[in-house]
């Protein structure tokens, strides 16, 4: 479903991360998850999301998990 995408929306990222949509919005709004704000919508570029996810993991626990 989400293959070959250029960008995700917040509900898609929440599903990928296995977190609630409201928690994902909190992480986006706080700047924890990289995003663009276009026409009132949050867009998460796939390349930025993948890089963020790869760089967020340290010692088996990601930095964003500490915020959960």
Image (tube, rainbow, N blue to C red):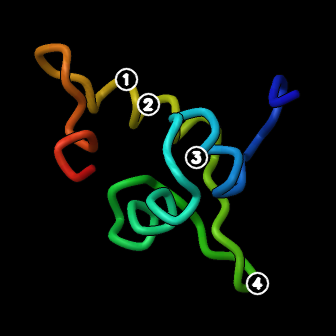
Between residues 65 and 56, which one lies in front from this camera angle? Answer: 65
The reply to whether the C-beta atoms of the residues labelled 2 and 4 are less than 8 Å apart is no
Residue ID at (82%, 23%): 3
Between residues 45 and 67, which one lies in front from this camera angle? Answer: 67
Q: How far apart are marks 4 and 1 (CA)?
A: 28 Å
Where is mark 4, residue-wise? 39
Q: Nearer the viewer's eye, disc 3 or disc 2? A: 3
Q: Nearer the viewer's eye, disc 4 or disc 3? A: 3
Of all residues, the one furthest to the left in this rendering is: 59
Left or right side of 12 for 3: right
Q: How far apart are marks 3 and 1 (CA)?
A: 16 Å
Q: In the figure, residue 61 lies in which quadrant?
A: top left
Residue ID at (52%, 65%): 22
Where is mark 3, residue-wise? 14
Where is mark 2, residue-wise? 51
Left or right side of 52 for 35: right
| Badge count | 4
Along the polypeptide, which appears first: circle 2 or circle 4?
4
In this picture, is 25 found above or below 32? Answer: below
Q: How far apart are marks 2 and 4 (CA)?
A: 24 Å
Task: Give the class, few, some or many, for how many residues have Cα within 10 Å of label 2's Cα (few <14, many ≥20).
Answer: few
Residue ID at (64%, 68%): 42
The reply to whether the C-beta atoms of the residues labelled 2 and 1 are less than 8 Å apart is yes
Q: Position of residue 33 (x, y in %)?
A: 42, 53
């Amino acid at each position: 479903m989400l293959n070959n995408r250029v960008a995700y929306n917040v509900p898609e990222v929440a599903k990928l991360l296995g977190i609630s949509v409201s928690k994902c919005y909190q992480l986006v709004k706080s700047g924890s998850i990289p995003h663009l704000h276009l026409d009132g919508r949050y867009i998460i570029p796939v390349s930025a999301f993948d890089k963020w996810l790869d760089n967020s993991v340290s010692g088996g626990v990601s930095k964003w998990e500490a915020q959960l």
